[in-house]
Image (spheres, grey):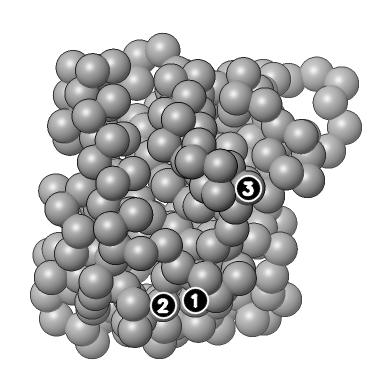
Amino acid sequence: MKMLIAGNWKMNCSLEDAKLLIADIINGIHVREGLRDRCEFLVCPSFIYMPTIRHAVLNHNLLSFGAQDCSDQDNGAFTGDISATMLKESGCQYVIVGHSERRGYHAESNALVKAKAQKVVNNAMCAIICVGETEQQRSNGEALATVLKQLEECVPEGADSKNIVIAYEPVWAIGTGKVATTADIDEIHTAIRQKLKEMLADGANIRILYGGSVKPDNAGDILNIPDVNGALIGGASLQAQSFLGIAEAAQ
């Protein structure tokens, strides 16, 4: 399977910065021969920049674009929410759900994450379902149990390798510069793979991404772990050179 190199821009970039960034990424993919043969590229900008990014993506057909979240509702009096249906109509192919910043800052439960993932799947898009433990949970020896519980409770009905991706992001490593050891990543990803095989008929084919301070200088070690099938990248996705440098590390 191709590596999925996904950039989560979060609440960053001005409109002009977003235009320059996507242009630099597209140009960078063009000049790096063979990169698209082994990697699929995805960018997830803020909602308001989606029309601009969609236009650039469709013109070049070099990468996919997605959203950072969606509502668990189809429509109605939900001020500020954006439905999966709206995202589908905007051309989105992927939607991130359950990111630790959503779980932490907005108290999103596993049940809510599953409901959002279900809307994404129902609208023929791919849900990137985020799982991961806090530093306290890891210190208490609860990392594996926490991640597997999230997985069990967040995967929607009808899930398969075409409509879900799992992203393991240890909460303590996001934006901190801390990175899990390759042994820790291997342990969690192996357990996720085994659980997916138990839960779903094609669980062996579902991509599992790692996220958490991934950079070009550590990406090679991370992306060469057997059940790591790509990366969900935060800060390093805001510069084309570092974003594509991570992809170049994938062998």
Label placed on residue 115:
none
Closest to the camera, between mark 2 and mark 1, is 2
Q: Callout 3: helix, strand or loop? A: helix
Residue nearest the viewer, comparing 164 with 54: 164
Q: Measure how far apart labels 1 and 3 are at the Cα level.
A: 26 Å
The structure residue drawn at horizontal position 56% and vertical position 42%, both measured from the top left corner, is 140
Quadrant of the frame with the C terminus: bottom left
Dot 2 amino acid type: Lys
Earlier in the chain: of badge 2 and badge 3, it is: 3
Whether residue 249 can be seen here: yes
For label 3, the crowd category at 10 Å Cα-Cα, with few meaning under 14, some 14 to 19 and many 20 or more, is: few
Q: Are marks 2 and 1 in contact (CB under 8 Å)?
A: yes
The quarter of the picture where residue 20 lies is bottom right
The answer to whether residue 157 is above or below residue 67 is: above
Dot 3 amino acid type: Gln
Dot 1 amino acid type: Ala
The quarter of the picture where residue 8 lies is bottom right
The structure residue drawn at horizontal position 35% and vertical position 64%, both measured from the top left corner, is 181
Residue nearest the viewer, comparing 127 with 84: 127
Earlier in the chain: of badge 2 and badge 1, it is: 2
- Residue 100 placed where, x, y %? 62, 46
The structure residue drawn at horizontal position 28% and vertical position 46%, both measured from the top left corner, is 187
Q: Is residue 36 left or right of residue 173?
A: left
User: To which residue does mark 2 refer?
Assistant: 215
User: To which residue does mark 1 refer?
Assistant: 236
The answer to whether residue 33 is above or below residue 181 is: below
Earlier in the chain: of badge 1 and badge 3, it is: 3
- Residue 58 placed where, x, y %? 40, 59
The quarter of the picture where residue 164 lies is top left
User: To which residue does mark 3 refer?
Assistant: 136
